[in-house]
Amino acid sequence: MACVQHTTVRGKVHRDNTGVVTEIPILVTEHGPLQPLVDYLLAHAHVRSHAWMLKVTQAVGLLIDYAAANHDSFENPQELFQTFSQRLYTGTVGNDGTDPSRLYWQGRSQAVVQALVQGISGFSDWMACADGTKPLNPWRQATRSEEMLAWAAWHQKRDRAFLAHTWDRETASLCMTRARNVLLKRTPIIDHEPVKKFPEERINDLLFKGFIVPGKQKSPRLEERLNLRDILITLLMHYGGLRMSEPFHLYVHDVISEADGAQVRIYHPSLGTAPPDWPDAKGKPIKCNRLAYLSGKYAMRPRDEYASSDQWHAGWKGNALDSKAHFMYVTWYPQRVGELFWQFWVLYMAQRAQLDCDHPFAFVTKTGKPYAIDSFERQHRRAVERIGLQSAKALGTSPHGHRHAYGQALADAGIDPIYRKKALHHKSLESQVVYTEPDRAKLMRALEAAAEREKAGAVLPLPDLLRYGFKDVDPLGLMSGPNPKLLRRP
């Protein structure tokens, strides 16, 4: 039986006499809630995501389990933490299949270990400042090689940064002289993998044969036959470049008609300007953000503030926004899709108006509740399978494949990277590289084309090093001269 010394529960914390509740994960041991961790998460709850809090809680829980199983093996906490970090990599099961500690951990990837160790290190640093304890992973003077690597990484990031002129070298120099005691393995550099995009030749089948209403396939009325809600979400991703979570923040107020179709704005879940339909005592619209709007008018929270396990949760990534009103435009490509979206939107709004929806979110269930991402993923999978495809992220047939199809379409059309950045709402130009890097299939085609050119006699001259660099060690001329025999392919 595994040696587990803790459990994690979902807690609601009242911090003052107001009605505001802060939800955090709470780690519970045999002695009750781990109060320092509770304090740490509450101190960061307003700036960090619930996913981050879960990761920190997971890391601390693993450390508690490890310490309980190995408390008699180390002379000080720092040594325990160093070995704990190693066991995250290696696991705890020996070559003979046994684990006297009863932890039975499997080895974790470098990325996961790095996140876990960083989570504990940050918590330990905070405790050291708050309670005067000794940190588990203290900073130390960096070695010369560590400092050089840190500077190299800094310069590489600065060269790619859009606002590189704002980077302060003096501030950076202070960071470069420090390193953590516990050293982690360096993550290997991985070339950009090819994006897995939804197959363009099947998108019409998905929209109009996959997203159908069961039992209504033969209805002559389009709005009865088709699942308009899921078609609209898919259009936003495939032809508007949105991430899967972003349509779930859309309000009914955020789509308006314009000359060439629908203008769609995706507002920041909490900072975005609220719609003007919440009047004050004098009947004038209350000017506020969406956090206050949802709370005051509907007793709700922005969807990114719900726990990731909650059905109403919808994530939000730090996008580059288009306005001080904290929203981003959906840029249709091709632009004519905006007309199709508006036609479907009008039909869908007529359907939604017949439901009891006590909230502003556009996409809803049959009972009028906010539509869940998990439910959409299930509907998308069924639609993909209806048209004879397998739903898998690796094949590009999951919802994630639509944004990739949009980005790839912009790249294939020769759209300048600065405009692709704008359309995809990336913060960095480097994010566009994934849509221009050749995948393995393109690489193999390029090599095959080169082989055909070689057969036709169009061979590029060899570099001087290969042509003339072996005279001293190659008296027979096998590797030198104008036609080196050993470098020629049969």
Image (cartoon, rainbow, N blue to C red):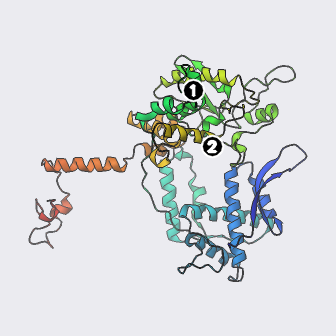
Q: Label 1 vs label 2: CA separation? A: 24 Å
* Corner quadrant of residue 113: bottom right
In the image, taking residue 479 as reference, residue 365 lies left or right, namely: right
Q: For the N terminus, give its image quadrant.
A: bottom right
What type is the residue that disc 2 sits on?
Asp
Seen in the picture, residue 379 relative to 140 is either above or below; the reply is above
* Residue 164 visible in rendering: yes
Residue of label 2: 374
Percent across and percent down for residue 467 are 16, 61
Query: Could you tell which of marks 1 and 2 lies nearer the N-terminus?
Result: 1
Q: Nearer the viewer, residue 212 or 167?
A: 212
Residue 439 location (% of width, % of height): 37, 48
Assign a secondary structure to mark 2. helix
**Discs 1/2, front:** 1
Q: Extreme left residue here? A: 476
Left or right: 481 with respect to 162?
left
Q: Nearer the viewer, residue 295 or 225?
A: 225
Task: Residue at 55%, 61% (x, y): give it.
Answer: 111
Q: Residue furthest right?
A: 17
Q: Is residue 11 above or below residue 146?
A: above
Residue 57 location, x and y as percent? 71, 60
**Residue identified by numbered label 1:** 216
Q: Is residue 125 above or below residue 211?
A: below
Residue 284 location (% of width, % of height): 81, 20
Characterize the local packing of mark 1: few (<14), some (14-19) or many (20 or more) Cα atoms within 10 angstroms: some
**Residue type, mark 1 in image:** Lys
